Image: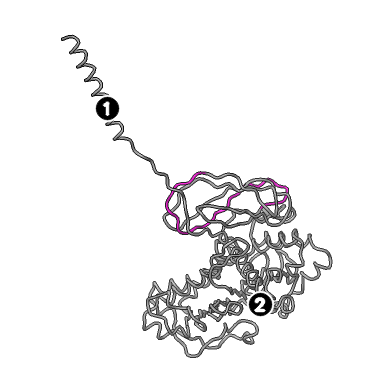
Amino acid sequence: MKKLILFSGVSLLITVCILVACKKSNETTTTTTTTASVSALICGSAVVSSTATVNTAFSGSATIPYTGGNGATYTAGTAIASTGVSGLTATLAAGTLASGAGNITYAITGTPTSTGTASFAITFGGQTCSFSVTVDAASTTTGCSTSTTIASKVVCLANAFLATLTTTQQASVVLTLNLSNAKRWSNLPCGLSCRNGLAFSSLSSTQLAAAKAVAQAAFGTTSGEGYDEFMQIMAADDYLGQTASGYSSGNYVIAFLGTPTTTGKWMLQIGGHHYAQNITYDAGSVTSITPLHQGVEPKGSFTLSGTTYSGPMESEHTAMQNMLGSFTSTELASAKISGTFSDCLMIPGSTTNTFPTTKQGIQVSTLSSAAQAKVLAAMVPWINDLDATSAAAFTTIYQNELANTYVCYSSNTSAVAGTASSFLTTNTDYVRIDGPSVWIEFICQTGVVIASQIHYHSVMRDHSRDYIGL
């Protein structure tokens, strides 16, 4: 009996062990890790926290938009060395993707060894693109960062830029402030034959970085507007230049009409094909932000040197679409004017630059409050092409005049009331905002280089402030 009991105990022990093992096996789970993926990285819209300075330790960040994120969590990356200008590294910060559109962030650190552009080729989520950080000469930022106003900072940077030039170059940049020189801006790819100043292509890397520092301070840092949009429009010209002659960011120019000063009057002119910025400063304040011209071809996304740009003027296009889409059928009928436009009225080469004496379309005061807000919002992408303080001041001016502002449009034969995306889609589709002061036009045109798609032209003027005091 004792042997039988012992054997039974062993049998029981074996049976229990087997049962426990089976239960443990059944409870084992498998952990699945989802790899981060995106459908597109948009390096062309990267926002860099600040400009670096040669031979000076730098610590900043770059924010890269993406689309098509899958919601996965990702770890920090390894340092990526800069090219073009060496000495900097970019390191991906850990995070979690949105399910759709969002941003990833890279920490930028190091000491750049030369002026110019430090480029970073990144691969993330199955996509690859490149973004860049501008590296200025030390003279372009020394002392300017402590300027108390944007106007004084622009003057400081303008004088720092002049210090990098030869005497002959300075004579080509600083010109007389008069009406004749002020009107030398254009929407055409005509280089210096129709503009004042020095071409970017004639500048050394140090001089070009200093010129761009002036533009960045004056145009502002709003994402997708101002300096960011300026750089994207120049990139679009480089894109066209791959297949057509006469198009290049090197054909853009810079000029100062009058000596940059915080006590007197002077004008900053920077422009080229599809871009013209004319900002007047007087006694340390911005007194005029017009004429301003912007256009772009191609209108949508394009890739240049590994960087994808997502449509430099899409914010302007969308804002105008949303404005017209907010009108009722009755309001649209009042706003529509006869005739077909081939270009904006107030672009050089198209007219004598004389504003029409009679306003056309529908008066904003007759619109619903929601539609009135859309009219003001439609102005903002142009107003935001300068520093934030000045942009806020001009927004207030135009908002105070909103009731007496008019909106008109023509063509748009396929447009449907209440459907914003149905407006401004085809050649000759045109819209205008005309106030006591503000004047903005936007038109769709058949492409010049890319004939299979439309491209955009726009102009912003001011009845009271164009060429102010000249």
Q: Position of residue 202 (x, y in %)?
A: 77, 67
Is disc 2 placed on a helix, strand or loop? Answer: loop
Q: Is there CB contact under 8 Å for labels 1 and 2?
A: no
Please identify, in this view, whether the residue under mark 1 or under mark 2 is nearer the observer.
1
x 68%, y 66%: residue: 283
Outermost residue to the left: 1
Residue 207 falls in which quadrant of the image? bottom right
Per the image, the residue denoted by label 2 is 467
Per the image, the residue denoted by label 1 is 20
Outermost residue to the right: 167
x 70%, y 77%: residue: 182
Give the quadrant of the N terminus: top left
Residue 159 falls in which quadrant of the image? bottom right
Nearest to N terminus: mark 1 or mark 2: 1
Q: Magenta part of the protein: which range?
A: 52-75
- Magenta-colored stretch includes residue 71: yes
Is disc 1 placed on a helix, strand or loop? Answer: helix
Q: Is residue 394 above or below residue 410?
A: above
What's the distance in space between the residues labelled 1 and 2, CA to CA? 89 Å
| Residue 425 in view, yes or no | yes
| Residue 146 in view, yes or no | no
- Relative to the observer, which residue lies in front, 328 or 304? 304
Q: Position of residue 201 (x, y in %)?
A: 74, 67
Q: Position of residue 227 (x, y in %)?
A: 61, 64
The residue carrying pointer 1 sits among few (fewer than 14), some (14 to 19) or many (20 or more) residues within 10 Å by Cα, namely few
Instruction: Say left or right for 112 vs 431.
Output: right
- Magenta-colored stretch includes residue 279: no
Instruction: Say left or right for 275 vs 395.
Output: right
